[in-house]
Structure formats: C-alpha cells, structure tokens
Image: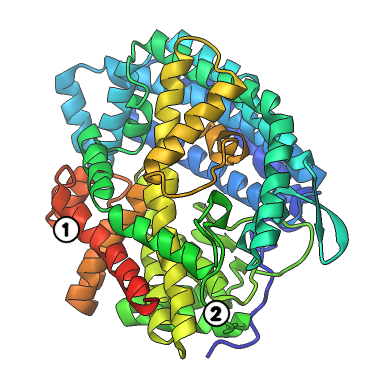
Amino acid sequence: MLTNLKHVWDLESIFPGGSESPQLAAYIEEISRDIDKLAKDVQAKIDDWPAFVERMQNLGGRLSEAGAFIGCLNAQNVKDTQAKLLAGKLQQLRAAYGSVQTSVDRQLLAIPNQEWQELLKDLAPLAFNLEERRQWAADEMPEAQEKLANDLAVDGYHGWSDLYNIITGRMQIPFKKDGKDQELSVGQAQNVFSDADPEVRHAMAEKWEQAWSKEAELCAGALNHLAGFRLNLYRHRGWDKVLKEPLEYNRMSNATLDAMWSTIDANKDIFVKYLERKGKLLGLEKLGWFDLHAPVGKSAKTYSYDEGATFVMEQFGKVSPKMAAFAEKAFRNSWVEVEDRSGKRQGAFCTSLPMSGQTRVFMTYSGSANSVSTLAHELGHAFHQSVMTDLPLMCQRYAMNVAETASTFAEMVVADAAVQNATSKDEKIALLGGKVGNSISFFMDIHSRFLFETSFYEARRRGPVSVDQLNDLMLTAQKQAFRDSLNTWHPHFWCSKLHFYITAVPFYNFPYTFGYLFSAGVYAMARQEGKNFEQKYVDLLRDTGRMRVEDLAQRHLGVDLTKADFWQQAVDLAVADAQEFLDLTE
C-alpha cells in the first residue's frame, strides 16, 4: 500500500525557481546560441555526419526539455505570465530549429545513393529516421521556400490557433444551478454534461450553443485561415491529397485507415442499441447529443489518492511487473501532480523530459473511478517513454497514433479490474457504461470529426466556408457517424472543439481511434498470453519511434493492419462490453 504520497509534483529538481529560474533562463539562452551556431555551420557542406546528427539530436532534446518544463509551469498555474512569455520564446526557437532541420534535410537529399547507403551503415540505429527525413525533404518545396513558410507560420498559421485559445480562454457561460447564478469557464461548463439531472444538462446545452454561436464568426475565420494555409502549402508542395501529411506524420497507409473505419462501421449496430438502452435508462424518449456523457447506474465508490495509486500499481503488476515498478517510482519520486486547486488548467497529460530521463504527469484527482482511470492512462504514457530512454533521441519520436498505445492499454487493465471488483449490479452497470461510452467516443464521435474535416477541406478548396455551411457539414457528419440515433445534435461542435484548431498535428482525430483500437488489439493478445507477453509488449513500444505502424504490427504481433482481422479482434472487446451492459439492463 502506497501511503502519504505528495499531491504536488516536483519541478524544482529540474529547474529550481519555476518561471523565474536563473538556470532555466541560462538554459534557454544557451539553446538560442547553439541554434544560431548550428545555422551557420549548416551553410557549409557537412562532412562529419555522425557528429552533426548527434549535435542535432542533443539540441532537439534540450528544446524538448525546456518546452516540457515550461508546459508544466503553464499547466500548474494558468496565471503565470512569465511562463507564458517563455512559451512564446520557445515557439520562436522551435521555428529557428525547424529552419536548420530543413537545411540539413536538403543536404541529406543531395547525398548520392551509394554514399547514402554507406552513411546509413555508420548511423545504423537511425537508418529508418534518416530515410524518413530524406523522403520528406524530397516531397517538400525548395529549401528557401520551406524556410519562408516555416517562419511565416509562427505568426500566421500558428497565430490563428493562438487566437482561438484567446477566444475560448475569455469565454464565460452564464448558468443557474441550485438557485445560484454562475459564470462558468468552457471547461467548467463542459463538466455539467456529466450531471445526472437531464434538466440541468439540457439547460446547459441551450446556454452552450448560444455561447458558441456568438463566437462562431471569429472561430470560422480562424478555421478557414488555418485550412487555407495548409491547402496553399500543400499546393506549392505539389500534394493533391489533404490526408498526405496526417498519414505520413502517423506513419500509416490509407489502406490501414480504410480498414479501421470499415471495420468500425460494420460493428455499429450494437452501439446504436446501447444508445437506445441508455436513453430508456435515463428516462428519455431518445438520447440527445448532450446526454452522451450522462451517468448510468450508480457507483458511489471513491478512492483516496493513496488508494487510487495503489490500485493502479497493483493492477499493472498483474500484466507487467515492469509497469508496476515504474508506477511506484513515479509516485514515490513525486512525478505526478494531482492536487485539486484553483488556477490549474483543465485536462490531463503526460510530458517527457528527455535530457533528465524523467516524465511528469498532470491531472486533477477527484477520487472517482474515472479519475483513477485517467491516472492509469497518463502513467501508461509515462511508462511508454521510460522504456525508450536509452534509445537515440531521434528514435524516441513516436507519432500520435501509437502514442495512445501504452496509455489506453494501461487504462483498459485498470478499467477491467474495476468492473471485476464491482460490489453491486448498479456499480457494474455504471463502470460498464463508462467503458462503452469511451467506445462510442472513439467509434462515433471521433468518426464524425473525421467525416467533418474531410468534407470541410473539400469545401474549403473552393473558397471560405460560412458559419451556416460549417454547421450543416457538422450535422451531416454527426448524423452519419451516429447512424441518426440521437434526437438532438451539436451543430457548433466544429467551433467548440479545440482539436480542430491544433496546428502541431493536422487531422487531430483518427489517430485517437487508431490508438484506442491498436491498444485494444494488443490488450486482447496480452490477456491470451499472460505475463509471457510483457517483453513482447516492451519491444513493441521501443520500436514505435522507428517503424511504420504496418511494419510494427507485423513484426511484433504478426498481423496485417490493412486487413479487417486485427481490427475486428480489437472491436470485439468493445462489443462484448456493450453486450454485457445490454444483458445487465434487460
């Protein structure tokens, strides 16, 4: 049993003094000087490639270290103005580093093939990553144009994302509950949709749509300009498919994406039945969009932080002693921030500090089963990073789709244990409802986002898309993805969902579903093989930053991701949960 765990993470051991840290300021200044020096050196022909690549990796690692630390500062205190300024400085340094990378990639591209093969022998551990960078350079514009686009993106492309964050950060949604008038932030208002009272949810739904309709014109402008920037950049690069960048970023093929969505679509009937049953259990004629996250059943069980941490560690130990040992290390070394206090940002995340060989987990712990599940999820991310720490930094950069593998795997382990340990039928129904609700999010909600973005980009090619058109596209996508199984929808979802405005990763949707199902497939195999699966699992995680996903799955799991078989095995786990829920609530 873990006891007396600290609720606040330790950042002082990284850079003492927080955003005012002299060590952090000196660290950032040194990074700035080294980028300038690297930029000058890359203007000449690179002769010693192993040494130069090592410099690049080290500099990239230090940028990530500073960025992760500053991200933690901004998360723990949203009013830390100095941390915000530091984040802006880091954004500029990343752009400068990106320009250096562009020059380096062009030199890689210019190396004759025979010489290139010899170089890959000298840099064998990085062969996949270097080949990837060389191919990417071949697909881009000439060097000067790429550098210009990269520089202009800081205040142009990324600036529209910053504007969206300003819009949502200042929003206040008026709401009356328990006779009290309140002004809620977007995050606080969103939590109301989990309220057990349908009148409360539906009252908030009305306020929510009103609030977003007021900001819709500004959001539409930002979204149109983001998409316009991407489409123009793609046109100048000679790319005719909008999915080229997201697919390449996620190291996957269109055939894999199609196989995944087709398998999901073929299995939606039981989830439509689940939505119908949930509506009846909630006393509604039919479920609406804003009822999707309403609780069913009753789970009064709560966990103190020590109890929750112990439960997570013990369940990890049943499938992987290495996971359990890592979780204990993270807890005892205060790598986890869970305190429930004002001034923290919403949500949860895990971030890695590659130069320190550490990670940090951020969340606000409430003691609920969902909170324990979130804790497991983020520790899964941290474990993933921990098994890669000894690899070259370039090999540690895994894409978003496989980033969710270890986290969702960890969450499934804990969620299954919670269901098995349920002490009443009501509690089991509540926990199963939570699990199936997650599947609905990945199979239907995220599918609607993918369908929306696909149709939006097609429309944007012809010119700016109006608010009314965006609403129509969103409604069409939601109705298709949910098989028209709801009686109310969220036409302003394109406006209220942050993911559409994230510039770091285009099409910030389908990788979540891929990660969820990929990890489910891995979990299904782990349950069959028991503890003998642990090393196979660790080996798979270690290769996530240096293989395409199809090769990763073939090597470590012996499956073909372009065929439906693997995806069906993964979907079957969610189908079984939905069927058990239906049987229990008959």
Q: Tell me the quadrant of the picture where the C terminus can be found.
A: bottom left
**Circle 1: residue type:** Leu
Q: Which residue is mark 1?
A: 557
The one nearer the camera, 545 or 276, is 276
| Rendered image quadrant of residue 464 | top right
Residue 235 lies left or right of residue 180; in this view the side is left
Residue 298 - label = 2
Residue 465 lies left or right of residue 506; in this view the side is right
For the view shown, which residue lies furthest in the right direction? Answer: 180
Counting from the top left corner in percent of width and height, residue 170 is at 79, 40
Counting from the top left corner in percent of width and height, residue 474 is at 50, 33
Query: Where 127 sits versus 422, above or below?
Result: above
Asked if labels 1 and 2 touch by Cβ distance under 8 angstroms, the answer is no
Which residue appears at 44% of the width and 21% of the height?
457
Which residue appears at 65% of the width and 25% of the height?
159
Counting from the top left corner in percent of width and height, residue 359 is at 53, 60
**Circle 2: residue type:** Lys
Query: Where 460 sits versus 415, above or below?
Result: above
For label 2, the crowd category at 10 Å Cα-Cα, with few meaning under 14, some 14 to 19 and many 20 or more, is some
Q: Earlier in the sequence, mark 2 or mark 1?
A: 2
Residue 445 - label = none
Secondary element under disc 2, as helix, strand or loop, is loop
Which residue appears at 42% of the width and 60% of the height?
276
Query: Where 48 sits versus 428, above or below?
Result: above
| Rendered image quadrant of residue 86 | top right
Query: Where 550 sits versus 189, above or below?
Result: above
Is residue 40 something one can see in this rendering?
no
Secondary element under disc 1, as helix, strand or loop, is helix
| Rendered image quadrant of residue 293 | bottom right
Residue 319 lies left or right of residue 199; in this view the side is left
